[in-house]
Structure formats: structure tokens, C-alpha cells
Amino acid sequence: MMGGMPAQAKMKCAEEWLKKAIDLHEVHLKDPKTATEASQMEMMEQMKKAYECVIGGGKTEAAPSKETEGKEPPKTVPHQHKH
């Protein structure tokens, strides 16, 4: 089988990462000050991991590590766009 994971396992893996990204995005919407560069990068990594689950890149584990699970986004650095 291509991708190394059955389709249902791929979907479960992607679902877990997308749920985390959606939850973090909701935090950003409720309180825009939480949308720090670090927090946005964390959300992007979660989306990339979900994508890897779907395409079967094998670079992602199905569940987040204990280090990142339940972590709140950093709230001390204001988000700034570079011009």
C-alpha cells in the first residue's frame, strides 16, 4: 500500500493535527494578541503535519509529542509584519 498507512489511519492522524490547528486559530481569533509569530508558526507546523498524514510522507507521528501537547501559545511577543 502506498504511503505506508491505511486510509483510515491517515484520516485519524490528520484529524488530530487539524483539530489542534483549528483550536489554536480560534484562540487567535478570540484574542488577536495571542497570534504571535511563534504561535502562528506552531499552527503552520500542525497543518503541515496534518498534510503529511494525508499524503503519507511518513515524517509525522499520529499524535503530538508530550512536549507540545496542551501548550498554550506564547503571549508575550506582539505579532509584527515586516515591511
Image (spheres, rainbow, N blue to C red):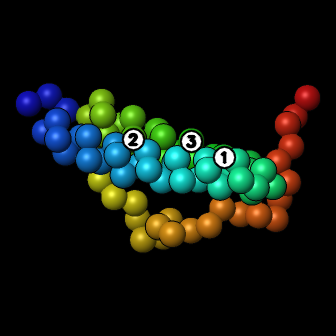
Labels 2 and 1 touching (C-beta < 8 A)? no
Horizontally, is 33 left or right of 45 in the view?
right
* Mark 2 and mark 3: Cα distance apart in space: 10 Å
Q: Is residue 70 above or below residue 1?
A: below
Q: Earlier in the sequence, mark 2 or mark 3?
A: 3
Is residue 78 toward the left or the right of residue 43 in the image? right
Q: How far apart are marks 1 and 3 (CA)?
A: 6 Å
Amino acid type at circle 2 is: Ala
> Label 2 neighbourhood size at 10 Å, few (<14), some (14-19), many (20+)?
many
Residue at 52% across / 48% down in the picture?
21
User: Residue 82: where, in percent of width, then height?
Assistant: 87, 34
Q: Residue at x 26, y 47 (%)?
A: 12
- Give amino acid for label 1: Gln
Q: Quadrant of residue 75?
A: bottom right
Q: Residue 50 carries which label?
A: 2
Q: What residue type is labelled 3?
A: Met
Rendered residue at 61%/50% (across/down): 26
Give residue 53's position: percent from left, percent from top. 31, 40
- The quadrant of the rendering that contains the N terminus is top left
Tag 2–tag 3 contact (CB < 8 Å): no
**Which residue position is annotated with label 3?**
44
| Secondary structure of residue under mark 1 | helix
Separation (CA) of disc 2 from disc 1: 15 Å
Residue visible at 26% across and 40% down in the picture: 11
Mark 1 vs 3: CB contact within 8 A: yes
Residue at numbered disc 1: 40
Find numbered disc 3 in the image and state the secondary structure of the residue it sits on. helix
